[in-house]
Image (spheres, rainbow, N blue to C red):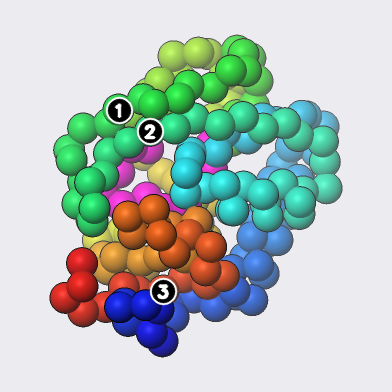
Amino acid sequence: MQYGKYTLTEIISADVIRKRIREIAQQLSDRFKDEVPIFIGVLNGSFIVLADLMRAMTIDCEMDFIKLSSYAGTESTGTVRLLKDISADITNRHVIIVEDIIDSGLTIQFLKERLEGASPKSLTIVTLLLKPDVAKIKFAIDYVGFEIPPDFVVGYGLDYQQKMRHLPAIYRLEGNNL
């Protein structure tokens, strides 16, 4: 499909995403049925994933956001910068980190270490997308929506230069327009 000057190829449809988000929400609701976990969304990309996940939850839960930066255009900068911290006290709480995508693993590694320093009761990681061929992480991701190849993708919260987050599915960005 053409989107302005960009060619996009759909790799995960909106219906398939919705179904998988509902499955993860049910698993989390079952796991934390006697608790009130706090979801920490990683801005900007996770806001759509987090909104849909929370609407599908069948238990009480809270949310907060953190904003990190590790990309310039399509490339990782190799460092993580904290742009906005959480405001909630997560000490002795069940914390669920919600990511849109785990690519190199740099951001999730930084975030895991930072939040573990606040002594949560548990730390669970949820990501819509995982690129296993490029992710360099030494721990398991608890809930993965989909594993994808190391292509650059947009839609459902993921962007290219702050554009295309609003698209309802996941698309591979094609061509030499990057």
| Image position of 165 (left or right of 121) | left
Tell me which label, 1 or 3, sits earlier in the chain. 1
Q: What residue type is labelled 3?
A: Tyr
Going by the image, does 147 lie left or right of 132? Answer: right
Element marked by disc 2? strand
> Which residue position is annotated with label 3?
171
Residue 177 is left or right of residue 4, and the answer is: left
Q: How crowded is mark 3: few (under 14 residues within 10 Å), some or many (20 or more)?
A: many
Q: Which residue is drawn at 57% across and 70% down?
A: 168
Which x, y percent locates residue 143? 53, 51
Task: Quadrant for the C terminus, please.
Answer: bottom left
Residue range in magenta is: 97-109
Which residue of the protein is positioned furthest toward the bottom in this rendering? 1
Residue occupied by mark 2: 68
Residue 27, compared with residue 2, is above or below; it is: above
Q: Mark 1 points at which residue?
A: 81
Q: Which residue is drawn at 27% across and 39% down?
A: 70
Q: Are there few (<14), some (14-19), or many (20+) residues within 10 Å of tag 2?
A: some
